Amino acid sequence: MKRELPIDAVIVDDEKLSRQRIRRLLEAHSEVQVVAECRNGYEAVKVVQEQKPDLLFLDIEMPEIDGFAVIEMLRDMRTMPHVVFITAFDKYAVRAFEVHAVDYLLKPVSSERLAEAVVHAHTAAGNREALTGLLRDLTGQRLKRFTVHASDRIYFVPFADVDWIEAAGNYVRLRAGGESHLVRSTMHAMEELLADSPFVRIHRSTIVNVDRIKELRPTFAGDYVVILRSQERLTLSRTYRAAFERITG
């Protein structure tokens, strides 16, 4: 979250009146800019992944998937927005702070409490550990799966199941055991997400799971043919020499 710029916020609540109230209260805070409103968890996941807001005002009890499920679906993001939970019940407070929410507001939200939440979000802006903790405390370890959005569902693909990843325009395609899954991302973002994992970039359009490599064969051009255990063949470009060194140990 950049202090010198407006804080981009998204409001997520299945009740229209609740969304309108939060937006109206935020009008008193010129540093906060509401960039989207979402009616359910699925909309929230899509909007957050596409717009990467700084702050999320998130209702907990919603149809189909609740606020905590939204956070889990977003856990493969490199940078999570700060989260202010909003609910009519106080029974979720302990769980909310266990996932490092910056505040917990009870409905109907007062202008005073919302102002405090904005201050807490500012304070948290200087502590990126809160964001990292929000992601990693949900799993107890480093992120281990991709979130894939289909037309009728959201599902997950474990990192360990993926053989290789290829660029596909504004998306990347996960190749896993003969199946393919489209994820809206860039190759650079994938590289960052997969840092310190068995994945390595071997070409401007290819990232491979090192554990899936069977052998390397040199070419006259100075590149290498990477042969996977599935017998698929990829190219290790000579411009990615560090990848060769990592694969060969």
Image: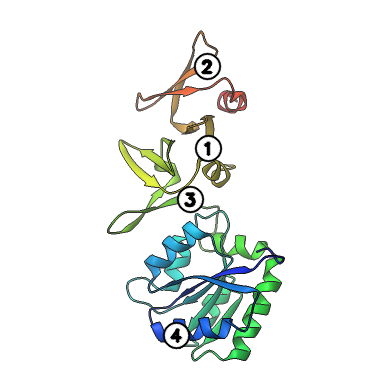
For discs 2 and 3, the disc positioned in front in the rendered view: 2
Residue at image coords 45%, 27%: 213
Which quarter of the image is occupied by the N terminus? bottom right
Which quarter of the image is occupied by the C terminus? top right
For discs 4 and 2, the disc positioned in front in the rendered view: 4
Q: CA distance from mark 1 to mark 3?
A: 11 Å
Disc 4 residue type (three-letter): Ser
Element under disc 4: helix
Provide the residue designation for mark 1.
198
Residue at image coords 39%, 42%: 161
Q: CA distance from mark 1 to mark 4?
A: 45 Å
Q: CA distance from mark 4 to mark 2?
A: 58 Å
Element under disc 3: loop
Q: Earlier in the sequence, mark 1 or mark 3?
A: 3
Provide the residue designation for mark 4.
18
Instruction: Return the x and y of residue 123 as percentages of the image width and height.
Output: 71, 73
Q: CA distance from mark 3 to mark 4?
A: 35 Å
Answer left or right for 115 relative to 231: right
Viewer-proximal residue, 67 or 51? 51
Label 2 with label 3: CB-CB less than 8 Å? no
Q: Is residue 22 above or below residue 231?
A: below
Element under disc 2: loop
Disc 1 residue type (three-letter): Pro
Label 1 crowding class (10 Å Cα cut-off): few <14, some 14-19, many 20+? some
Element under disc 1: loop
Q: Which mark is residue 223?
A: 2
Q: CA distance from mark 2 to mark 3?
A: 31 Å
For discs 3 and 4, the disc positioned in front in the rendered view: 4
Label 1 with label 3: CB-CB less than 8 Å? no
Label 2 crowding class (10 Å Cα cut-off): few <14, some 14-19, many 20+? some
Provide the residue designation for mark 3.
144
Q: Earlier in the sequence, mark 1 or mark 4?
A: 4
